[in-house]
Amino acid sequence: MFSIESILRMLPMFFLALTVSAYAHDADRTYRSCTPHTVTLTMNPIAYLSPESPIQWEFVNSKLLTEKAHHIPKMIPLISLEEHFFSTVIDNPDTYSEQFKWVPGVLDKLQDLGPIRLENMDTNGISLQVISHAPGLGSAPPAECITANDQLSKAVSENKTRFAGFAVLPMAHPDEAATELRRCIKELGFVGALVDNHINGQHYDDKKFWPIFEAAQELDIPIYLHPTWPADPLAQHHQGNFPTSAGISMGSSGWGWHSDVGLHTLKLFASGLFDTYPRLKIIVGHFGEMLPFMIERIMILSKRWGDRKRLFKEVYDENIWITTSGVWGVAPMACILRNTKIEHVLYSVDYPFAKNEDGVVFMEELRGSGLVTEEQFEMIGYKNAEKLLGVKAVQ
């Protein structure tokens, strides 16, 4: 039992604990928790000041508490790779901007390469964005890609420590695309390319596209395969006895375009692309576009896909990187960390289609989950991107 004297000594801590608890409920909610627990009152007031406390802090900007007081390390600088803009100077921009009307306000954010974007990055700990054009202009004339890349290059040059660029390529014109890739890397200083997953339903296992991959290997830069809307036959396949809007979602961001990128990656492997270009670097987003969750089965069945120099798992380990872009969840991340090299897992958001704020929440949850060490957390957050792209996070 506590003596009266000891109780009196603990009273200041008790009232401080109650004040802290009130602030935790009422203060700024820009911070979400690292654990699933909620704020809990205990009979022991000392627990409120203990690192082992079950307290769930719900804020970061409170003036009452410092980082040391609530035992949460400062968030590391983040590099995000799948972050988009929309060129305002290409021919017929209205043709492409139509598809963004389903997300209120997103077009304004896409077109901004200045204060709005930078302020949002600052608020959410994004040290560097690697920016790419959305949508890919793969079916457009090469001149439109050149124009879009030049606009992005200007923005990067004005914010060299905050922006880097992925080229948009005219994939329907493979030779011109390879030429533009070389220009963007050698002259504009871009760090790779992001391309739509198909051209009118055609994937890039066809050898007519391989000059682009040859250039990428030669330049030692990655190609990011990004989902896009399904071609008409596949789009119809996703419709059924439910609202049309549900079918559109299933065929795109709700399922279909993710599985299609995963399928495309398997087709590139089966075609022998990675035998021909063994140092090729491919990035796929959204937690690996379903590949990590099927990889054990793929490893078994892909042995029947032809006489390849390496097994699929070897290619997966050596040639494929995955990002977190817009898919937030510690449970699927646990799967990824069990079958994917930690050096090949990178943070991304998919801005502005996904929110930087949600990315921060996910990273804080990952940090507190026990799934990764602090060093591994830093690798995912920015160090792997620094190594892959030759960029640098601003501390």
Image (tube, helix red, strand yellow):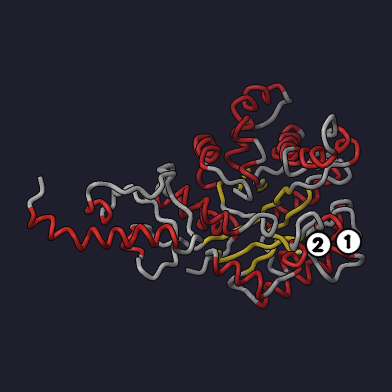
Where the N terminus falls, by quadrant? top left
- The nearer-to-camera label among 2 and 1 is 1
Q: Is residue 359 depicted above or below 108 in this figure? A: above
Say which residue appears at 84% left-offset and 57% top-offset.
Answer: 137
Say which residue appears at 84% left-offset and 29% top-offset.
Answer: 241
Q: Is residue 320 depicted above or below 27 in this figure? A: above
Q: Residue furthest bottom?
A: 158
Nearest the viewer among 152 and 28 is: 28
Q: Which residue is mark 2?
A: 180
344 relative to 76 in the view: left or right? right
Q: Residue furthest front?
A: 4
> What kind of residue is marked 2?
Glu
Say which residue appears at 86% left-offset and 54% top-offset.
Answer: 175
Q: Earlier in the sequence, mark 2 or mark 1?
A: 1
Q: Is residue 346 depicted above or below 299 in this figure? A: below
Q: Which residue is mark 1?
A: 142
Please identify the quarter of the rendering in which residue 165 is found. Answer: bottom right
In three-dimensional space, the C-alpha distance between marks 2 and 1, rounded to whole angstroms, equals: 8 Å
Nearest the viewer among 13 and 134 is: 13
Query: Residue 191, how many percent across, how many down?
Result: 66, 61
Q: Are marks 2 and 1 in contact (CB under 8 Å)?
A: yes
The numbered mark at residue 326 is none
Query: Residue 72, how many percent across, how many down?
Result: 37, 57
> What kind of residue is marked 1?
Pro
Query: Residue 309, how many percent across, how many down?
Result: 66, 32
Residue 366 seen in render: yes
Q: How many marks?
A: 2
Query: Residue 41, how many percent across, how many down?
Result: 31, 49
